[in-house]
Image: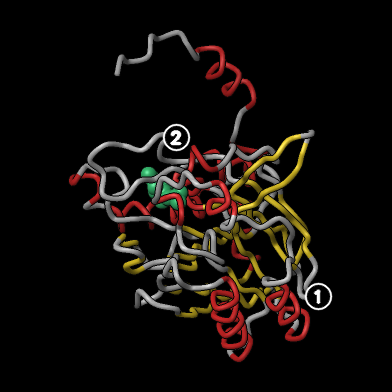
Amino acid sequence: MSRIVKAASAQMGPIPKSQSRKQAVSRLVAMMREAKGRGAELVVFPELAFTTFFPRWMIEDEAELESYYETEMPGPETAPLFEESKKLGVGFYVSYAELVNEGGRRRRFNTSIIVDRNGEIVGKYRKVHLPGHSEPQPGRVHQHLEKRYFEPGNLGFGVWRAFGGVMGMCICNDRRWPETYRVMGLQGVEMIMLGYNTPFDHTGHADIDGLTSFHNHLSMQAGAYQNSTWVIGTAKCGKEEGSSMVGQSVIVAPSGEIVAMAATLEDEVITANCDLDIGKRYRQTIFDFARHREPEAYRLIVERKGAIAPPEN
Ligand code: CDT
């Protein structure tokens, strides 16, 4: 018997700086309704989905900076999304900037959550791979100051039983790193949800930036195939405050094949019937970790680490 999760990726076009949280949330609610109308039970929204992508600016005014963070989830302005989730019986993934008092100090994380079909938070993740810089880079039209505005996540890569399967999540730059998927793969993940904001000028090197769309899909397709898991990647895209960001949100099968892809750079919902048992076929054959990852061989690999001097940069 197959286990189908009817899933949607709800891509967002730009959120201008002038757009309020309330307006952004109403866009998310509209897409959740559209997804429900197409039979979806789970919707994946983008990274930092409630505001413009503020790490593109050096913001020195603390009050202005903190206005981009959520101090509670749900809070008064984000609650309508949770209420709609419960009303429609549609779960979701969303990412937001989190400001918390933890260990006696104020801490900031780039965070995501999985919410079940009752509108209840079942899992929380904090972004591990923070790209960009902590200081503004001279000559760059758009900064990328995630290292300034967030601490590296301290929750690891967890998985959760929800939607009839084993669910995992990560955020944007995490999708480029094989260990993101493998840590969840070793825990039996069956579907990984992620959101991204990826400017076309993200490295500042034309030869690499020209491959932005290719690398976006390459990372997610490889992660899906090598770990026998569905991957749903959702963009915030289009020209946001002068910064052009890649779209092409996708639903990727455990075969590595893209089964649905957004065609615009605007708010757009794509859907797929994701059979979690497709992943099982790969996990029981070509990627049977228990049979094919020989502990002794892996021990030797680890022991050889450091045997050869790493190249100098
Ligand atoms: N948001 C995010 O993580 N974006 C990065 C690109 C920025 S690198 C300066 C990404 O990997 O898509």
Residue 132 horizontal/vertical position (percent)? 40, 40
Q: Residue furthest left?
A: 206
**Residue 254, above or below 106:** below
Callout 2 amino acid? Ser
Q: Nearer the viewer, residue 282 or 210?
A: 210
Q: Is residue 193 visible?
A: yes
Q: 204 left or right of 221?
A: left
Residue at 60% across, 58% down: 96
Q: Where's residue 247, x and y in %?
A: 37, 67
Of residues 4 and 38, the one nearer the viewer is: 38
Label 2 sits on residue: 134
Q: Name the quadrant containing residue 24.
A: bottom right
Instruction: Please report contact status of discs 1 and 2: CB closer than 8 Å, yes or no.
Output: no
| Residue shown at 44% from the left, 41% from the top | 131
Closer to the chain start, of discs 1 and 2, is 1
Locate the N terminus and report the quarter of the image it occupies.
bottom right
Residue drawn at 56 percent across, 18 percent down:
302
Judged from the image, the secondary structure of the residue bearing numbered disc 2 is: loop
Q: In this view of the protein, which residue sits in the foreground, 187 or 310?
A: 310
Q: Residues within 10 Å of mark 2 (few under 14, many from 20)?
A: some
In the rendered view, would you say 18 is above or below 132? below
Residue underneath mark 1: 118
Q: CA distance from mark 1 to mark 2?
A: 39 Å
Q: Residue at x 58, y 57 (%)?
A: 67
Looking at the image, residue 53 sits to the left or right of residue 289; the answer is left
Measured from the top left, where is residue 313 in percent x and y?
A: 29, 19
Q: How many neighbours does mark 1 have within 10 angstroms: few (below 14), some (14-19), or many (20 or more)?
A: some
Numbered disc in front, either 1 or 2: 2
**Pointer 1 residue Cβ closer than 8 Å to ligand 1:** no
When asked about the image quadrant of residue 70, the answer is: bottom right
Quadrant of res 165: bottom right
- Compared to residue 158, the image places residue 11 above or below, namely below
